[in-house]
Image (spheres, rainbow, N blue to C red):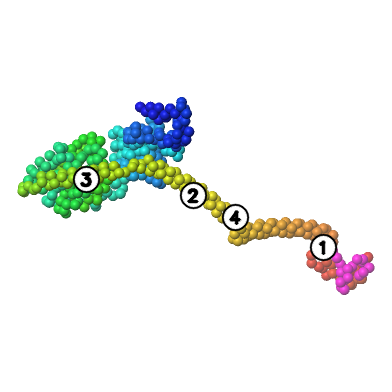
Amino acid sequence: MTNLDDLFPSRVLEETGPDAVPGRAGEKFVYGVSGLLDALQGRIDIDFSSIWVRGEVSSLRRPSSGHLYFLLKDAESQVRAVLFRFQARRLVFELEEGQEVLCLGRINIYPGRGDLQLIVESVEPVGEGALRLAFEQLKTRLQAEGLFDRSHKKAIPFLPGRIFVVTSPTGAAVRDFIRTARARFPGVRMVLCPVRVQGEEAPWDIINALDLIELTARAEDVVVITRGGGSMEDLWAFNHEGLARRIFDFPYPVVSAIGHEIDFTISDFVSDLRAATPTAAAQLVVPDQKVLSGRMEDMVQHLRLLISRTLSNQRHRLQALRAGLVDPRRRLADRRLRTDELNSELTRLLSARLTSERQKISYAEQVLSRHHPGTMVRLARKDLSEKHSRFERAAGIYLERRRSRLGNTCASLDAVSPLGILARGYSLVYTEDKKLVSSSEDVRPGDRITVRPARGYIECEVKSTG
């Protein structure tokens, strides 16, 4: 356990850095904020350089930088975590909210905010359910890309020139395959490619073996990737996305014989042929005939030596590089986090600026729309139509009033009109020279007169007057 006295000495430094001159006797050291964080980080790098942390994923964020930011929590506490883009690409499953995972990483203090966080190097799902979820996620994604389509499957040669058996050299699977293959075709040429078939490094062993095989294989050769049965965790190496894509891109036929008949892996789906067991693979690949045996053991030893030499050279090279390289991971992590913050802030400012400009454009469009000639003509036509309707209604009302007034006038005139009097039974009498007779003295016996009733006329002759 870390002693606080080791982190904070008992004397005061008047300066803010660790190189400051101590003060008077009995005083304590004083750290500046940066000096304090550097001291804490130095102690953390010693005590927590690489740790496993188990927890539930929460508040998962996926910014455009490709890094993954999340909280790792349990029932009582939580810690910030970041998985950088390079490590995130190596995940075999899709990290989701609520997943329980195991994270391998190191503790880091980000000086920009003074936050404690876990820099994650790798993530593993916890439990059978999580592995099944990762399997289904990868299967769905690769199937959508067409890696399982039959159109990409290569035919298995009737008589393979060589069979490259990629498996553990100590497992039962290789013995079953070899025994069955030799029983069916004693002269079959088999090349054992020893790899790890379980564990984190197993997929990369198999990928490296396929790379080496591609350098020497010919069109008539076949590759068989096999191992015995086991739990889902035991077979998990064969659900690696990188291995699946390498099998898909491999130019020669690949047969997958993983586990038992009920076991299925991603390698089974992407391979050119799937066998239920290693024995079944030998029965599918090797014809049932007898021929001379090949140089299998020599090639196995040569391949082992080549792999051992390559791995040894790489280890020596890696050790030399580590010895001459100062660990830049902390500064690189800080720069990455700062870059991501600036990128997020720039994205927010650009979004706000675009929203403001769009609002201005929308307002200008509304103003222009109100003053558009077509809009003004349409409004003027609408106003003219309304005025025309009001004019027609006013003209009708005016004419109706005039007609009513004219009717009243006509009625008044009819009341005093001579024709009205005639209509009541009276008549007008005219002489022959069209003069109105108003008295009997205006005519004489024998004169002809014209009587004008309300309608028509009557010609009369005067007989007498009185």
The label number, if any, that marks residue 246 in the structure image:
none
Residue corresponding to mark 3: 313
**x 19%, y 42%: residue:** 195
Q: Give the position of the N terminus as an image quadrant.
A: top left
Structural crowding at the residue carrying mark 4, measured as other residues with C-alpha within 10 Å and reported as few (<14), some (14–19) or many (≥20): few
Structural crowding at the residue carrying mark 2, measured as other residues with C-alpha within 10 Å and reported as few (<14), some (14–19) or many (≥20): few
Question: Which quadrant of the figure has residue 396?
Answer: bottom right
Decide which of tag 1 and tag 4 comes sooner along the chain: 4
- Tell me the distance, in whole angstroms, between the alpha carbons under discs 2 and 4: 26 Å
Decide which of tag 2 and tag 1 comes sooner along the chain: 2
In reply to whether residue 435 is colored magenta, the answer given is: yes
Decide which of tag 2 and tag 4 comes sooner along the chain: 2
Residue 170 can be seen in this image: yes
Between marks 3 and 4 in the image, the one whose residue lies nearer the viewer = 3
**x 60%, y 61%: residue:** 373
Residue 260 percent location from the top left of the image: 19, 38
Q: Are marks 3 and 4 in contact (CB under 8 Å)?
A: no
Q: Mark 2 falls on what kind of element?
A: helix
Residue 53 can be seen in this image: no
The label number, if any, that marks residue 367 in the structure image:
4
On screen, residue 139 versus residue 216, left or right, reads: right
Decide which of tag 2 and tag 3 comes sooner along the chain: 3
Q: Are marks 2 and 3 in contact (CB under 8 Å)?
A: no
Question: Which quadrant of the figure has residue 174?
Answer: top left
The foreground one among 403 and 291 is: 291
The label number, if any, that marks residue 419 in the structure image:
1
- Tell me the distance, in whole angstroms, between the alpha carbons under discs 2 and 1: 97 Å
Structural crowding at the residue carrying mark 1, measured as other residues with C-alpha within 10 Å and reported as few (<14), some (14–19) or many (≥20): some
The stretch of residues the image draws in magenta is 427-443
- Tell me the distance, in whole angstroms, between the alpha carbons under discs 2 and 3: 51 Å
